Image (cartoon, rainbow, N blue to C red):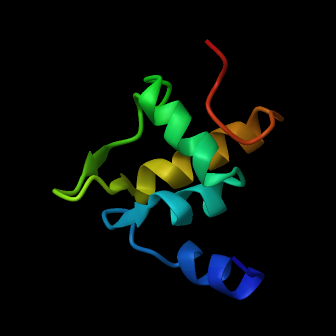
């Protein structure tokens, strides 16, 4: 995703949902990393669901909170290590 697309995502209402790729771009990680975190249960604070086709979606407000919390703590993007 380029900077313009990421800027557009920043204007998303918190109650809307991001696809796996969009959420990963906002957080600053690879989509496969975000999938692994979700599969391993490391995103307990991020509301998500799977479509009937298996696509994973994440609540935008929770994605923003994860990103902002990591930045505030001075950590690399992503959830806290277990």
Which residue sits at x=80%, y=37%?
A: 76
Q: Is residue 70 above or below residue 49?
A: above
- Where residue 37 sits in the image (x, y, percent)? 53, 32
Q: Is residue 1 above or below residue 37?
A: below
- Where residue 32 sits in the image (x, y, percent)? 60, 46
Q: Quadrant of residue 34?
A: top right
Which residue sits at x=43%, y=56%?
A: 61
In the visual, does 9 lie left or right of 73? left
Name the outermost residue toward the top.
82
In the visual, does 49 lie left or right of 59? left
Name the outermost residue toward the left.
52
Which residue sits at x=45%, y=75%?
A: 12
Q: Which quarter of the rendering shows the N terminus?
A: bottom right
Name the outermost residue toward the front.
53
Seen from the viewer's position, the closer of residues 20 and 72 is: 20
Q: Which quarter of the rendering shows the C terminus?
A: top right
Which residue sits at x=66%, y=38%?
A: 78
């Amino acid at each position: 995703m380029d900077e313009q697309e990421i800027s557009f995502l920043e204007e998303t209402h918190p109650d809307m949902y991001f696809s796996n790729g969009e959420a990963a771009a906002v957080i600053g990680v690879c989509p496969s990393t975000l999938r692994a975190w979700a599969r391993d249960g490391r995103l307990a604070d991020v509301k998500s669901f799977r479509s009937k086709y298996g696509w994973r979606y994440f609540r935008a407000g929770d994605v923003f909170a994860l990103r902002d919390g990591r930045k505030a703590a001075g950590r690399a993007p992503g959830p806290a290590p277990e």
